Image: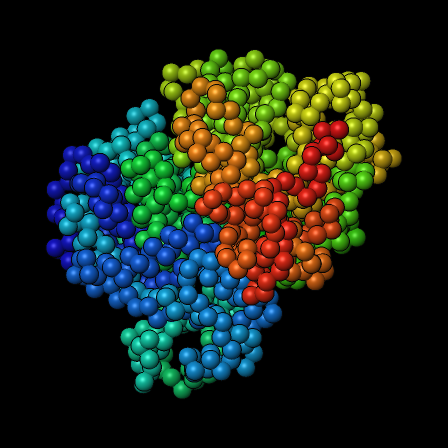
Amino acid sequence: MDPAVTSLNNLPESAPAVIIGGGIIGVSTLYHLAKKGVEGAVLVERKQLASGTTWHAAGIVGQLRESSAQTELSKYTARLFTELEVETGQATGYKQNGTLHLALSDIRAEQLRRNHDHAARMKIESQLLGIEEINEIWPLVDTSDVHCGFLVPSNGQVNPLDVTQALAKGAKALGSKIYEHTRAIRILTRNGKVIGVETDKGVIATEKVLLAAGMWSLRFAAEHGVTVPLHAAEHFYILTEAIPDLPRTLPGLVVLEERLYTKEDAGKLLIGGFEARGKAWARDGIPDSFEFDELPFDMEHVEPVLEKFFTRFPALETMGIQTFFNGPESFTPDGRPYIGPAPEMPGLFIAAGMNSNGILNSGGVGLTMAAWMTDGQPPRAVASMLAARAHPFQKNKAYNAERVTEGIGLHWGLHWPGRQIETARGIRRVPLHDRLLSAGALMAERIGWEVPMYFDPANPVWPERASLGWQDWSQRVKEECLAARDQAVLIDQSMYGKLLVQGPDAVRALNRVSGAEMDVAVGTSVYTQFLNGKGGIEADVTVTRIAAEQFMIVTGHPSQIRDQAYIRSHADPAWRFELFDATSAYGLLTIHGPKSRAILQQMSADDLSNEAFAFGAAREIDLAFARVWAIRRSFLGELGYELMVPSEFTVHLHEEIVRVGAAHGLRHAGMFALGACRLEKGFRHFGHDIGEEDTPFETGLGFAVKLSKEDFVGRDVLAKQKATHGAATPHRTVSIMLEHATAEAGPYLIHNEPIFKKGELVGHITSGGWGWRVEAMIGLASLHREAGVTKDWLDEGEFEVQIAGKMHAARVQLGAFYDPSGTIMRG
């Protein structure tokens, strides 16, 4: 490391922030803290900067990501790399060579056409290429089985070591301090909050710490009771000898179906791959001496990948291979990074688990973490990457080591709706798990839970056919949705988070973060959102007051930890309340459909009539031989009940519901049916249709906000928004239906498809799919119009959705397409 960039080991006694880890993520955050005017922030690194995994990264910089917010952050990274060298005088090696993706199948070709649409919406230049054009740009690749190509000219590549030094130099110039060969021993706390970092060179007092230690993060965090699930895997690539006349402007090449990538590297080709099943590394811990280390090249393990290299690039047969490289990369269980505040320790922030995307994430993540650590919130929505989504069991080292063998392949392989994880399965099971399997449940994995997605007793094997449209399970899902409409369905949602908030100030704690009024009568269920300072949505939950000082929150299983942390972080320390995670204490069975009341009434002496038990009410009732909290709600939009029952009674209750329901046509249903039905009802899904950058008024959820109640997070912003725009906000979530589509042939709405009105881009699809009750392709969409998204404007029509390059006429409306008045649900 350049001594001009690194401070001597005279540690300051205190610092406004301390960063643990000198990879590109930590250094980028230090740089962006300095850019925000934070003077004297400190970074400590156990060895030298970039000596863990950063130094051997391929350095490919892409921009298109799964969401608009993430794409904007990746675009920022690309811009940063073009400006950094000018600012610091330190070369970064950044070249905008572009990236060329090849499709070897119809499904991948459609994905690339959809990516082309998405790129245009995000104002990123891209091109769809035919075989002749691909051969002109990339003559060394075999295109005999290629369908098409997709080129993003503004993508690029960078030298990881150089760009890390440039960021470090920029940070130092603005007053930041970097200490190499300084090991963080532990984070110091008082009353659970960060007060400093102890290193082998001394203690630094601070109230803000960022853990950006890459593959070391899991074990270091676990020693402090913090969950950062990730594990290192071996990653292989080869570097050819110099190739005469190889263009230095050659675009990077990606063949996702073969898990290959390549780029020009100083007149050579660097060619890498991600095996379907990789090798976990350092199961027993990373050696203390690790620094710029290479791992042994396992020729036998990587041989299948090498064969693909040589087949795809025939010229390799006559080229020399200069380097066979193997180095560690860390991957997370779900393939997404962990960033943001650690829910277990106020003052600690996490930025780790980049899944081999550390270089292309570096600018955006550094910008995000610097804003979070100074302003208290990120500049863009990052919900899918939140550190608070991790669950405590995921600290388990064996779990992460097992999952990473598949995670490396999931990172760089063909994806489609319903693709399933195979490793580390069967960890978290609802009480009815075996009963559901016996009924024909096909399970998917969600944060360790085995979740029933659909039921098919005749064929209880998860399909492996890749499709963006009609699926092998579509007929079964249709039957479940129609049963919900005509008879009744039973869904086990016991994996949903259940949080008990109790105490004299429980109502104050909930009112602080909720848009709706929580001080309601006992036996009332309230639908609400937790809100942030911008009025954006941090959680989408139902809250039931089960006693004067007791409230039960039901939330999605990914939000089980996040929502607890959010309540605690916004509560006054003097308030008297406690928050108990009751997820495992209760089963949650939901029954929906016109026969649901008759089924339950046959099992109970309590009056379940609409007059006695109206929509939105909650009541503890006798059901079979159990006592159950029943809540009149249905995410399917039918007459329905959510039944919360102590776990030990769940099997009994299930048996009785199935027995009684048989005469009424009751059948089991899974999450696919729930998802299809909620689209027909226009019910928003947190994480897809609504998130941190969306306010309730923009998403059609203003009915769940009570501005007249005492101060709550985001109230002033929402009050101003309502006063300024009323119902006609410039951004609005709406329901959308294609005029001409079939379930079998599509076209299918999925996510991110652009929407036009009279040729002008006005929005995009946030989620979509086939609606079996309305027999149409439907979805939810986010529209934008400066003058306001009004009913009259929507009623004018002339909307089109772009799907894989083709325009399709669409109908748009504010309300749902199925039972828009809610008569069925409230009947």
Q: Residue at x 40, y 35 (%)?
A: 534
Is 571 located above or below residue 168 in the figure?
above
Identified at 31% across, 36% down, the residue is 375
Residue 496 vertical placement versus 411 (above, below): above
Q: Residue at x 28, y 65 (%)?
A: 94
- Out of 93 and 45, give the one closest to the viewer: 93
x, y percent for residue 398: 48, 47
Relative depth, front residue between 26 and 804: 804
Q: Position of residue 316 (x, y in %)?
A: 42, 82
- Image quadrant assignment for residue 196: top left
* Quadrant housing the C terminus: top right
Taking 294 as reference, is 662 left or right? right
Q: What percent of the width, then of the height, locates residue 144?
A: 54, 82
Q: Most extreme residue toward the right, as rendered?
A: 663
User: How are the colours assigned in the image?
Assistant: rainbow
Which residue shows up at 54% across the image and 62% down it?
114
Q: Is residue 691 visible?
A: no
